[in-house]
Amino acid sequence: MKKQLPKRSEVDVKYTWDVSQLFENEQAFEDTLAKTVENVDAFSKKYENKLKDAKTINAAIDDLKVIQEALVVLSSYQSLQSSTDSTDESNQMRTGKFMIQVQKLSQKLTFLSVELNAVDIDILKEAKAQSKENENYLEEIIRERPHILTPDAQKAIAALSPTLNVAYPNYQRFKLADMKFPDFEVDGVKHPNSFTMFENEWESEKDAKLRRKAYEAFYDVLGQYQNGIANNYQSHVQKEKALATLKGFDSVFDYILFNQKVDRSMMDRQIDVIMKKLAPAMRKYAKLLQKIHGLDKMTYADLKIAVDAEYEPKITIEDSKALILDGLSMLGPEYLEIARRSFDERWIDFPQNVGKSTGGFCASPYGKNSFILLNWNGQMDEAMVLAHEIGHAGHFQFANANQNILNTRPSMYFIEAPSTTNELIMARHLLMKADSKRLKRWILSVMISRTYYHNFVTHLLEAAMQRKVYEKVDAGEPLSARVLNGLKLSVLKEFWGDEVEIPDYAGLTWMRQPHYYMGLYPYTYSAGLTIGTVVSGKIFNKEIEPEAWLEVLKAGGTKSPQELANMVGVDVSTEKPLEDAIKFISETIDEIESLTKDLEK
């Protein structure tokens, strides 16, 4: 029987991240927040109504960087602690206090964008020519000029920002603090359940009866919250539509993709090609799982089981360090040092506990080390998740070290490329060392079930549904739990066809992911993995030197996603990288099938 999750106070501190690397104690956080408030007041007095010439504009942007650096560290300190225990009232209060202060500071800083948007374009171009450091920031101001609002409208939106952006924290509070999952019973035995436990353990439980019952119990609880969360989500997308209209965009798609620096065709290509060309391979994989496990039928609750559950290697946290350092060594000593520091300096938060955010993420506040959240379950594939998050850490450690704070973030389209490159480098490394057919099959199956299923299927199907949602929003059609459930169900059935039985409750799956509150984010996972598939192959086959990839990481947000990919010979303006990735996935599934036949002899 699986155990209930421990409270945060009960986990081993040595396996948690060390937020004291941001602030030594709570007083230091409070002092820095107070000092930042003073700095913003001084900034406003110094520059408001004075941004008339290139020299003053560049001076203001330089001073803004200092304020932004402090705000990023302050924000990280409060959000990281909330993500490890959202049930802790002190974490809730710290976050609430910080958000109130940020609202006030945002209002005071609004004059900067208002005045820069009113300055003659020629003056902005002069300022841009005078400062290489501020060039990209100013170029974005110029690029956004056709979509600027009136000064009063900009100030109003800044003042309302905390309210306008409340949908995501509302969702997280629903999910992590309010939802309670009762025990479920199978054959007279009760079993605990929770969001974290379901996604980390029950989804891949090898006992079909237990697994399917866990699914039913989990989705039963989701159903109890569907109307409130649907209303919360509708308010979010309607806000996006309203802003799109105010800013003069014809479509909410154009509005959101504007910041990604890609057009809609690049998003549509990811969704359409994968839905059409990857689906047959994944259906084949599903039927292979059914055969291997002797299932009476293949259902939605069976899609995440392991090919070889009995062989699932276990790994300790300590051993994962050696494994990852060995696998990532081909990226060179500069990269390896970042990976080593992530373990030695407690950048990583491993334990599962009550109130902790599900899944994993990496935060890299400017000028500080990175922070990686995991829900460690001791299985080898969790090491792949860690390699993925270290990919994000490496990316932003390089970007932060080589760019100023305004230039570190690339387009969301590219954001998952460095992380998925790491996953595939690790998988290829393990394959190279595999000494048995069973181990080789296990590694290949993890590539499919974790790396590709997660990014090319789970998130892509989110994207396919999300596109349908925004089409309705653009058309002025209302949303409801029934509508959202129907959209998700139709996408799942389209992708899996008749090979997988999709129950009605699966329509509630949209409730499980926070990505819907992050713009057009879901499709970018497949975009990043498309680049990662090609780049990892190039590195492994010595078609490019690791240093070439590190130069891409160091470029941060100074180039468009197309330009970044072109630095290593990947042309994302065509279907070729995507089709090459799908071909690689299909061949991997064929190899798993072949190895399975060999092992059955």
Image: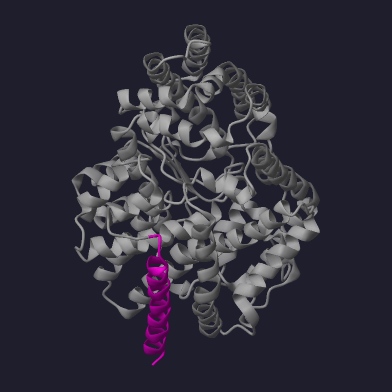
- Residue sitting at x 68%, y 27%: 160
Camera-side residue: 43 or 16? 43
Give how far across and how far down residue 400 sits, in percent.
34, 34
Residue 46 vertical position relative to residue 578 in the rendered view, above or below: above
- Residue sitting at x 43%, y 72%: 582
Residue 290 vertical position relative to residue 418 in the rendered view, above or below: below
Give how far across and how far down residue 466 sits, in percent.
64, 57
| Mark count | 0
Residue 369 vertical position relative to residue 224 in the rendered view, above or below: above
Question: Overall secondary structure of the magenta stretch?
Answer: helix
- Residue sitting at x 34%, y 74%: 439
Q: Is residue 374 visible?
A: yes
Give how far across and how far down residue 165 sits, in percent.
65, 35
Query: Which quadrant of the figure contains the C terminus?
Result: bottom left
* In the displayed structure image, the side of residue 525 where residue 405 appears, left or right: left
Asked whether residue 559 is drawn in magenta, I would say no
Give how far across and how far down residue 350 sits, in percent.
45, 45
Task: Give the magenta range.
Answer: 572-601
Camera-side residue: 427 or 100? 100
To which quarter of the image does residue 62 belong? top left
Residue 492 vertical position relative to residue 18 in the rendered view, above or below: below
